[in-house]
Image (cartoon, rainbow, N blue to C red):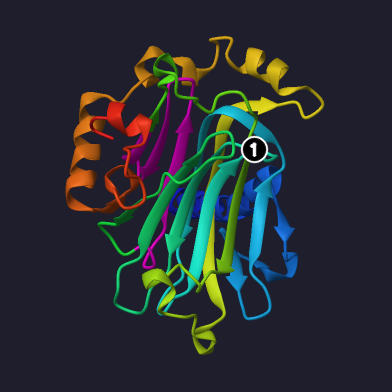
Amino acid sequence: MVFSFLFILTLSLCVLCVSVCSAARFNELFHPYWAPDHFTVVGQTVNMKLDKFSGAGFSSKSKYMFGKVNIQIKLVEGDSAGTVTAFYMSSDGPKHHEFDFEFLGNTTGEPYLVQTNVYVNGVGNREQRLKLWFDPTKDFHSYSILWNRNQVVFMVDETPIRVHTNLEHKGIPFPKDQAMSVYSSIWNADDWATQGGRVKTDWTHGPFVASYRGFEIDGCECQTTMVDSYNMRRCTSGDGWWDRPTLSGLNMHQTHQLMWVRANHMIYDYCTDTARFPKVPIECEHHHHH
């Protein structure tokens, strides 16, 4: 009897900890930078809403150079046409680097699309789009970005969906010299987000809510008072877990996972868009399985 009481007490304390810790973790790592009145915390979940007055966004309190960031997100349910929920890393300034997840809402019953993009020195135009193999509005799923000197890997539930490889030896710039903040935001983008902008946001279905939990950043935290060159030297010392040789590329299993995603779920790849790029972008010539 005492044992069962203690077991139940321990279990309830664990549940309480998960619930409180996730929100505490959010406050430790992030803060709202846009429309703080559009945030609510319910148990272990941080909710961020879009209504006809405003979207909302949060950013990390620190900047990082290399490592892995992971957040569990449950996307806007029901008719989410016109809305975009973004999860991304970005440095500052016109020559910034950026790694984007953009979740493009859709009319009820139509699949969410995930668009990824990579900016290097202020230049993007590297969009890929895919349909997920699950409904991302029904439950939380993990979305991750792994970044080191050799590659940037976008992952969904630890399955790689995109790799941007360091091809500096081919004369192609790679994002490795600017500290980045981590962001998420939700906003109205009905001029382009759903079916090329043909389907507009139906505000009678608002407010539109994206939910977050499981906040993790495991990377080289940068000192904001120091210049990027100092941070780059410190973060590329070889001591970080992200510099392990095993993380310099995908392993065989991950390579097969990525091939499966590309074969079954990708619906757009800038590398094959000859209308936009009559000359194949140079990095596409060297990226074989990604």
Which one is in front, 234 or 74?
A: 234
Which one is in front, 95 or 152?
A: 95
* Residue 94 place in picture, x, y as percent: 67, 40
Quarter that holds the C terminus: top left
Badge 1: residue crowd in 10 Å (few <14, some 14–19, many ≥20): many
Q: Is residue 114 magenta?
A: no
Q: Residue at x 19, y 34 (%)?
A: 256
* Quarter of the figure with residue 186: bottom right
Q: Residue at x 38, y 63 (%)?
A: 139
Q: Residue at x 63, y 46 (%)?
A: 25
Q: Is residue 159 magenta?
A: yes
Which one is in front, 47 or 257?
A: 257
**What secondary structure do most residues of the magenta stretch adopt?**
strand
Q: Residue at x 60, y 73 (%)?
A: 50
- Quick check: 65 above or below 74? above
Instruction: Report whether residue 2 is seen.
Output: no
Which one is in front, 259 or 157?
A: 259
Which residue type does callout 1 highlight? Ser
- Quick check: 235 above or below 24? above
* Residue 11 place in picture, x, y as percent: 48, 52
- Residue 243 located left or right of residue 56: left
Circle 1 sits on which residue?
91
What range of the chain is rendered magenta?
136-163
* Residue 271 place in picture, x, y as percent: 31, 42
* Quarter of the figure with residue 123: top right
- Quick check: 271 above or below 102? above
Q: Residue furthest right?
A: 225
